Image: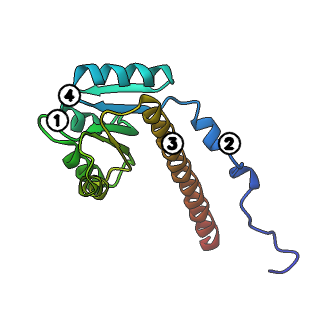
Amino acid sequence: MPEDSPKKSMPVSWFPDNLLESEMSLIPLRILIAEDDPSTQLIIERALEADGYKIQIANNGSEAWDYLNDEVEPPELAILDWMMPGIDGIELCRRIKDRKNPFVYVILLTAKTESDDIIEGLEAGAHEFLAKPFNFNVLRARVASGARIVRLEKALKLKNSILQDYIDKLERESMG
């Protein structure tokens, strides 16, 4: 490029190091709890609400699928019981995985603990697998880890969109 040509570069301010991630951490994450046992449901709900998450409750797999398809406020993280009436947790994992977007981080809860069960759950699309009975501090830690991944995924999607807009702008400028 000749020295007198203006350089076309992306402003550095478009990508402040952790600004997007830190701003996103201020927005409460929407978490779906799909659990047919009311007492387990309530304990999980209270613990996660105390941590600042926005909770959605489904009593069975069919209700969970409705929440997951909500176009206005779909959950960003789902805690799914493996064995539920209607659609089970494994089938929900498969459906979430098959549709690709929007990204939903999935924690699968189950009394199943065999290696084959864990493999089946993870292959179906779960990101985490937690055997019942579980320690609530472990669940909270796994939710926090999942929340970080969800926020990074959202920040990456936003950055990719900004980059694509910039590429489109450069292409328009080069054509005209």
- Left or right of 94? Residue 145 is right
Residue 38 percent location from the top left of the image: 24, 20
Contact (Cβ within 8 Å) of mark 4 with mark 1: yes
Q: Position of residue 167 (x, y in %)?
A: 59, 65
Q: Which mark is residue 19?
A: 2
Residue that lies at the very extreme toward the right in this rendered image: 3
Residue 69, can we see it?
A: no
Q: Which mark is residue 145?
A: 3
What amino acid is at disc 3? Ser
Residue 30 lies left or right of residue 59; in this view the side is right
Q: 10 Å neighbourhood of mark 3: few (<14), some, or many (≥20)?
A: few
Residue 40 found in image quarter = top left
SS at badge 3: helix
Query: Considering only order in the chain, which callout, 1 or 3, is on the residue closer to the N terminus?
Result: 1
Seen as rendered, the residue at the extreme left is: 86
Q: Nearer the viewer, mark 2 or mark 4?
A: 4
- Left or right: residue 170 versus residue 79 is right
Callout 4 amino acid:
Asp
Residue 68 is tagged as none
| Residue of label 1 | 84
Indicate which disc, 2 or 4, sits on the residue closer to the N terminus: 2
